[in-house]
Every structure is written in C-alpha cells, then in structure tokens.
Image (tube, coloured by chain):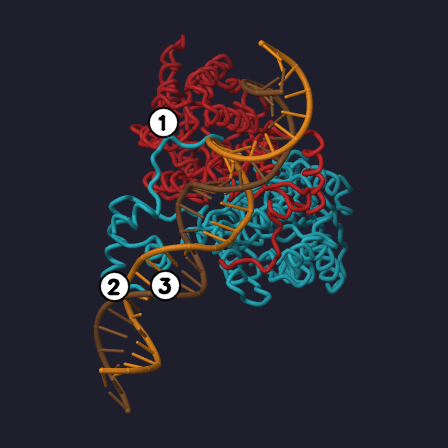
Chain colours: A cyan, B red, C brown, D orange
Amino acid sequence: MTATPTPRVTIKDVAARAGVSKGAVSLAFNRKPGLSEATRDRIFRAARELGWSPSLTARTLAGSRVDVVGLAVCRPARLLGLEPFYMEFVSGVESVLVERSCSLLLRLVRSPDEEVGLLESWWRGRQIGGSILVDFRADDPRPAVAGRLGLPVVAVGHPSLTGGLTSVWTDDATAVTEAVRYLAALGHRRIARVGGAAAFGHTSIRTSAFDEAVRALEPPARAWQVATDFSGDAGARATRSLLAAAPGERPTAIVYDNDIMAVAGLSVAAEMGLRVPDDVSLLAWDDSQLCRLTHPTLSAMSHDVHGFGAEVARTLFGVITGEGPGSHPVPTPVLTPRGSTAPP
Amino acid sequence: MTATPTPRVTIKDVAARAGVSKGAVSLAFNRKPGLSEATRDRIFRAARELGWSPSLTARTLAGSRVDVVGLAVCRPARLLGLEPFYMEFVSGVESVLVERSCSLLLRLVRSPDEEVGLLESWWRGRQIGGSILVDFRADDPRPAVAGRLGLPVVAVGHPSLTGGLTSVWTDDATAVTEAVRYLAALGHRRIARVGGAAAFGHTSIRTSAFDEAVRALEPPARAWQVATDFSGDAGARATRSLLAAAPGERPTAIVYDNDIMAVAGLSVAAEMGLRVPDDVSLLAWDDSQLCRLTHPTLSAMSHDVHGFGAEVARTLFGVITGEGPGSHPVPTPVLTPRGSTAPP
DNA sequence: AATAGAGACTTTACCGGTTCAGTAAGGGCT
DNA sequence: AGCCCTTACTGAACCGGTAAAGTCTCTATT
C-alpha cells in the first residue's frame, strides 16, 4: 500500500502553533504533570485548530501503549456467520473498547497453530496490546504461549480449561443441571442433549454435567448425548437420528448447545410429523432473537452475551494494567421457558 | 497499556547475526534489488533462527504501507449479531486479506457521523491503508470525505449511490424483478415485499424495482411494500399486518429483504394458522444456512456472500495500488426455489 | 592505464511520537 | 544574600523500521 497524498499534520505543527516544544505537546496529551494550565490550554487549542490527534502508530512505536485488542477466532467461516453468539459477543467487547478509544483486530484462523502464530506475530510486532482467547480445548497451547510472551490475555472459558490465565466464564455445568432438572420437573424421563464440538473444553464440561445431572434424577431417567460441529445441518441430523426410534424409545426432550441447532431441530420435528412441545420438548442455548422468531417459540437457557463480551473486555483492560490473574464468573444462564417445552 | 517485559528481537539483532547492516535486512525483506543471493539467504536464515519478522508498526511509521483495512459498521449491535450476512461477508473479506497478511480493523459505530470521524482518525493516524464502506444512504457524506482525504476505499453498493467511488455491487433491481416474475409465473397476483430500512440506498433501489416489476405484470397484480429495520421482530410485525386481511384481500406471496425476517414470517404464518406454501408463499433474501433449517425450507434469492466479501477485498487492493475508479458488479442473486413457494 | 559503470552494501536521515536528563526562573527559608 | 526546591519547560535520544544517497570493489570499455 502506498503513501498518502494528504499533507499530514503532526505533533511538530501543533508544537509550533502553540509555541512550545513537541515534548510539551506530548505531556499535555498524556495528561502528565509538569505543565501550567495556561500552556495546556494553548496546546489543546492549537491541536483542535489543526485537527490533530496523536498518531497511534507513532505512539505504539515509541513504546507506550497499544490501543488495539486482538481476537482470533478459529471456526469455519460459514458457521460463524450463523452463530448469533459471536457478533453479539463482539459487539459487547466493542462497547467497552470504544470508551477507551480502542479498536478490535479481528482475524479468522483455520487452525489452533495458526492462531498461536498469529498471536506471536501480533504481539512481537506490537500490533496488539492484549488479546481475547476463546474456544479452549484440552491441552490448549495458548496459556503457555501467553505466559512465555508476556502477552496480556483474558481467556473465555472455565478456569479448569484456561491454564491459570485470567478467565471470564459462565457456569455451564450449573446451567446444564438446571436445564435437566427443569425438564425432569416437567415429567420428562428420556432426555437428550445435542452438544457442540467435542474438541472444545466447554463442550466436555457440559457433557459431564449433563451425565451427572441425569444420573442424579429420581426416579431415574434415560439420557442420550450427541456431539456435533455446532452447525444447523449437524443439529438436524442429530435430531433426526434421536427421534427416529420408536415412540416409547426416543427422547421426549432435547437440549441443544446453541440456538441454530435448536431451530434446525424444530424443523426436523415438524418434518417428522412430531408436534412441539406435545410430542417432544426442545430447549435452546444462548437465546438470540432467533428463539423468539420460531413457531413455537423456543425455550432457552439465556444469557446476556453482549454483557459477557463487555465483561471480557473490561477484564482484559485489568490484565493489561497489571492486575494479577483472576477468575471472573458472569451470571449463569437462566432458564427462559417459552413455547417449545411442556410436559411429555 | 503498558510495555512488554519480553525482550523483543528487532531488525538490528537480525542484521548483527547475519553480519550486515539493517538496511540490508530491509532490502532483503522487501525483495528489493541490490543484494547477492548469498547475503539474502544468510539474512533470511538469521531471521528465521531468531524468529523475527518486521514490525508492521515501524514499517507503517516509516511511511510505506499500512497492512490494515478498516470496516466500520453502523447498525445496532443486536441486529448485526443476527444477520448471517455480515459475518459471512467479513469472512470473505478476511479470506483475501489473509493472503496479503493484512488484518481487518472492525468497529461498530452508532451514527454515520461517528463513522466519518473514525475514518478520518484512522486514516490520519495511519491506522489503515484503506477502508470498506457499506450501507450507503441518500446523500452519503463518505464519498466526499474519502475524496478529500485521499483515502483508498471501496464502496459496497450500486454506483448510483456511491458517488463515483469504486464500487462492488449486486444487481438488486434485476434480482427483485426476477423474484416478482417467478412468483407471478407461479400464478400469484397479490404480492408483498417486506423491505429493509428505508434509509439505506439499496432498500430504495429494491423498492422501486419491485414497484416497476409488479406494474409490468400482465395480467395486472396487486402489490404491498412495508419498510422495517431488518430485525426479525419487525419482519414478524410486518407479516402479521399483511396477513391479517381477509383471505381474498391479502397477499399470497411475500418477498423478504433478508432471511431473518423470512424466518420470522414463516412462524407468523404458522401462528395464524396459514400453511406455507399452500396459503402463502414466502421468499427470502441472502440465503444463509438458516433457509435450509426451517420447515418448510425457505426459497430464497441466494448469492455468494463470502465470495462477495472476497471480491470487495480484492477490489480494495486494486484501489490501494492506484487503480482508477471502477464499477465491479458481482453475479446477480439467483432464485433458489425450495419448499416455501408454490402456486397460490 | 585511466575511467566509467554496475553491483553490493553501508550510512544517514527521517517517520511521529515518548521519555528522561537538563535547565532556567521563581519562591521560601535561614 | 545564599541555598535549596519546585514548577515549567526544552532538547536529544530512542522506538524499529524504510529509503535515498554514499562508499567501495570489481569488471568492461576506450
């Protein structure tokens, strides 16, 4: 990319106009002590008149801050487009970044290795001041990498997955348990779960919580679990195979790991001639607007994804400013009953 | 944000290790002439051994390229999360950026003014080497701003909206016409369209194309159009009011401006006891995976959003490297009939 | 043999900020 | 009056690169 034809106004111009040195301008714009009110005002006025604001690039190079936060996401693009979760999460992150005049550097990567490489190069190249890490897997390399680099990060995921990094997480285990108890309380004794990608840590947390919750049920209940890739197609396939069994042998309630799959499940049920919720109850997860657009509307474990993103960003700023590692739980998803769940 | 504790490896270290000056390293890494093969190799080897790659920040400051592309999006966060379009578009953009080791700087803004301010500050601060502009409105200020700044941009939208900027666009007018003709060919004589936000230029293009297409129908047909904000809720409301009329007075086919609203329309029809497609045909737009997850599946005007994003990115690189303004149409959305459309 | 020119590097001056060691002026204290 | 402290500011070095001009060597030409 080539240079601009525009005459750029720099700190030097501002300094000249205010009749001070560029050091003074720098002090003023960083709210550091050592300048009289009068001079400060003069500098700001000059800057305003020239329409100047400090170049982040130069600022970064000079070694102070980096006003950019990284987010690398490793999922197939097609899926991302569909998951309302991500965009909403991003918008929550943005809402906090904007207050600090920070930007988000977003990159889709194809493999965990590529992500690690990207983080290294972003950090070494001072492209980012910190990063948000999502989708933790078993033996995730990122905690080690972040530690080695000294890269400030916040991990989105349960502390058991994030290797000692500062983490922000929802208590999925409790939420799954609540979902199971709710369905059991409705009278369901054959409960299935269509889970996400098995590689992700939060999926396995939910999987074992589901197992345990069902096992604790009294009277005892039957359980099924299917792993998918989070896509609607996979959700549809899973639902189809679950519901293909004889009426007395198939689940009467299905919990999904996101809302796309629940929507897919809904249409599979319709296609198979099963009524929701009379013949089968469906419970979604994440609860985007989508859940209220179907017929019947989808009951869901809902949480404030936007707020979640905001909390993640706030926590990242904490890490960047030197706060020690910590664990930041955000409110557990709560059950929002709608039209897709009822007694069997 | 504070500095790193990590010992950074710089061009100087590489130069020292390869036994040359930093100028030589720079030449090597920019593939410029003036170095022997042997030296070049030695430099690359040294760089590899030290794990060094040039700092984009420094590179930027030194006045050559800027390897970041901006994208400011001015829509409510909640909506964005739902529109499969955006994430898919972004992923298409990314797919091209990655090849050029470019990153995407993404920012959600709340108003067109804020967007203009952001572009200015990004460009003046050398944060971006170019930008993608979306969602053009009538009398959009951005062409003027881009021109004044000399900022390389590519506009996503019909040339009639984008004030002479290089643009990439789909021929929505033709697509709308095709949609209307298709429904008419099925025998529909009462056709409605649930459009997007009236402020957007592409919405008004579709609106007049729809009008004209219906008017050209023989035998004549009746038409309705409703403006919304693209949200599912709005789509549901619009559908409800369209279908509330007496059977002989209401539309027998509805075209939606995105797929979320079509999904909402589908469930409104169900809720009102109308069968799709027997009582009313529904036609979606954009055709994300969502359209195949409903029951019945949604017929749609489908186009390759990922490829569209990729083309936009490629075009932006063209602009950045100095190509003159141009108009780049991408393939018109094509009709993909599925289960939601049939003769009335 | 003298000279020009090409090839292979090195030197040096930026880019636009931050930071830190000075410095000069003013005020309080003895 | 002399001394020490602040306070307010300047100047220069530096961040990690790029780019243009300069240096040195070796070969080809007249």
> Quarter of the image holding residue B143?
top left
In the image, is residue A260 above or below residue A19?
above
Chain that bears disc 1:
B
Q: Nearer the viewer, residue B140 or B270?
A: B140
Give the total number of marks visible in the rendering: 3
What residue type is disc 1 on?
Answer: Gly
Residue bearing the label numbered 2: A37
Residue B117 locus on image (x, y percent): 34, 41
CA neighbours of label 1 inside 10 A, class few (<14), some (14 to 19), many (20+): many
Residue at image mark 3: A32
x and y percent of residue A244 in the render?
Answer: 75, 39
Asked if the residue under mark 2 is in contact with the one under mark 3, i.e. CB atoms within 8 Å, the reply is no
Question: Circle 3: is it few (<14), some (14-19), or many (20+) Cα within 10 Å?
Answer: few
The first of marks 3 and 2 along the sequence is 3
Q: Nearer the viewer, residue C1 or A25?
A: C1
The residue tagged 1 is B201
Q: Kindly report which numbered mark, 2 or 1, lies closer to the viewer in this rendering.
A: 2
Q: Secondary structure at mark 1?
A: helix
Q: Residues within 10 Å of mark 2 (few under 14, many from 20)?
A: few
- Disc 2 chain ID: A
Q: Secondary structure beneath disc 2?
A: helix
Q: Residue at x 34, y 42 (%)?
A: B114
Judge from the rendering whether residue B19 lies leftward or rightward of residue A306; answer left or right.
right
From the viewer's perspective, is the residue at label 3 or at label 1 nearer? Answer: 3
Q: Does residue A50 appear left or right of residue B265 in this picture? A: left
Q: Position of residue B75 (x, y in %)?
A: 41, 40
Q: Are marks 3 and 1 on the same chain?
A: no
Amino acid type for the residue under numbered disc 2: Glu
